[in-house]
Amino acid sequence: MSNPVICIGAAFTDELFHAKEEMLLATTNDAVVTKTAGGVSRNIAQQLALLGVPVQLISVFGNDSDGDWLKKNCTSAGVRLDASITKDGLSGKYTGILNVDGSLFSAFLTNAANHLITPEHLSKHKNLLQTASYLLADANINVDTAEWLLSFSNQTGIPFILEPVSVPPARKYKDVNLHGLYMITPNEDELPVLCSGKAFLTQLQIEELLQKGIKNIWLHNGQHGSALYNKESSITLHAPSIEVLDCTGAGEGSLSGYILGKHLGKEDMDCLKLAHTLSAEILQVNGAIATHLNQEKLLKLVNKYYPD
C-alpha cells in the first residue's frame, strides 16, 4: 500500500438551502434543503478515498449524532481517522444559501473547533505524519499549526499544500513566512489578500508569492479555468462548459483530482485535466462529493471534457 495523503482541517455537516427562485432580501424565500458531509479537508479526504488513494484525516468531531454520522461517513468511504479528535459538544456545521443558479448567496459556519488541532497534537502523531506522501491543510486551521506543518514539511521533504478556503481564512496568511510551501491554491478573490498592497496586478501577486519561496501557485479562475505557476514555467487550462447545479465543493474536487494525478505519476497538465474533469462532475451534482465516480470512471471521463 502506498503512503497516504494526510488531510488536516475541517469536518462539518453541510446544510444547503437551494432557492427555487431569485433570492429576495428581508423576506421568505422558497427553498429545498439537502444535508451532506462537508468541510474542506474532509471533502478532499473522502473524494481521494473514493478514487482509490490511501488517506488519513486529522479533524475535530463533536460527540453528538452529527459527529457520529460524520465519522461513519468518512470510515465507510475508506478514510482513516487515527489522529482525529472527538470533543465534548456539537459538531461543526456549514449552512449555505444557494442562488437559483447554484452559486453561493451567503453562508454561515458554526461550532467550528479547528483550534483544537494544535502543534502539540500534531507532534504526538509525528510517526503517522512521517508516512505521508502529501500533507494538505485548509486555511481554517490556526496559523501556528500551519507553520508547524510547513516546518515539518521542510525538514522531511514531504510536500505540503495549503488550500485558502475563502477570503477571511486566507487573509491570516498574508504576513506568514511560507518559504518552502509546495503549493497554494487561491482563486481570484483569495489571491490579493495573500499579498501586499504593492502587488495590485495578478502577475505581480504571483511573482510576490514565488519570491516568498512558495514553489507552486495554482490560481483558480472559475468558469475560465485555472493556471499553475512556478519559477520555471506556467501552464493554463480552460474549464469545460457545463450547466452548474451546485457550486459546493468544486474547489476541493479540483484539488482532489490534481492529487490523484500526482499519486498516479502524471505530469502537471494531465493533473490539471483530471482536476477540471472532477470539478465539472461535482458541479453537476448536489453536494461536494462525486460519489458516482471511481478512479477508472474518472480517468475515462477526461477524454469527454478534453478530447485529444
Image: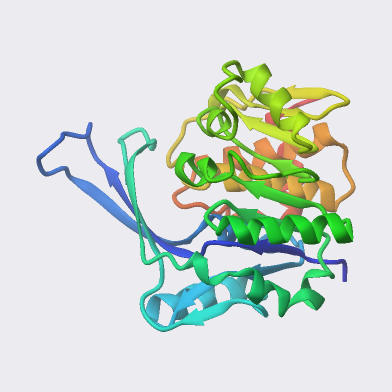
Colour scheme employed for the rendering of this structure:
rainbow
Which residue occupies 88% across, 56% down? 157
Residue farthest to the left, as pictured: 27
Q: Is residue 304 depicted above or below 108 in this figure?
A: above
Position of residue 119 measured from the top left corner of the image (x, y, whole percent): 65, 69
Q: In front: 217, or 297? A: 217
- The answer to whether one can see residue 119 in this image is yes
Position of residue 255 measured from the top left corner of the image (x, y, whole percent): 67, 45
Which residue occupies 87% across, 42% down? 266
Locate residue 125 relative to residue 241 in the image: left or right: right
Locate residue 136 relative to residue 200 in the image: left or right: right
Count of number-bearing discs? 0
- The answer to whether one can see residue 78 in this image is no
Which residue occupies 23% across, 47% down? 31
Q: Where, quadrant-wise, is the C terminus in this rendering?
A: top right
Which residue occupies 69% across, 40% down? 275
The image quarter in which residue 178 lies = top right
Position of residue 118 measured from the top left corner of the image (x, y, whole percent): 60, 70
Q: In front: 35, or 138? A: 138
The image quarter in which residue 185 lies = top right
Locate residue 48 relative to residue 38 in the image: left or right: right
Locate residue 271 relative to residue 69 in the image: left or right: right
Position of residue 289 measured from the top left corner of the image (x, y, whole percent): 55, 54
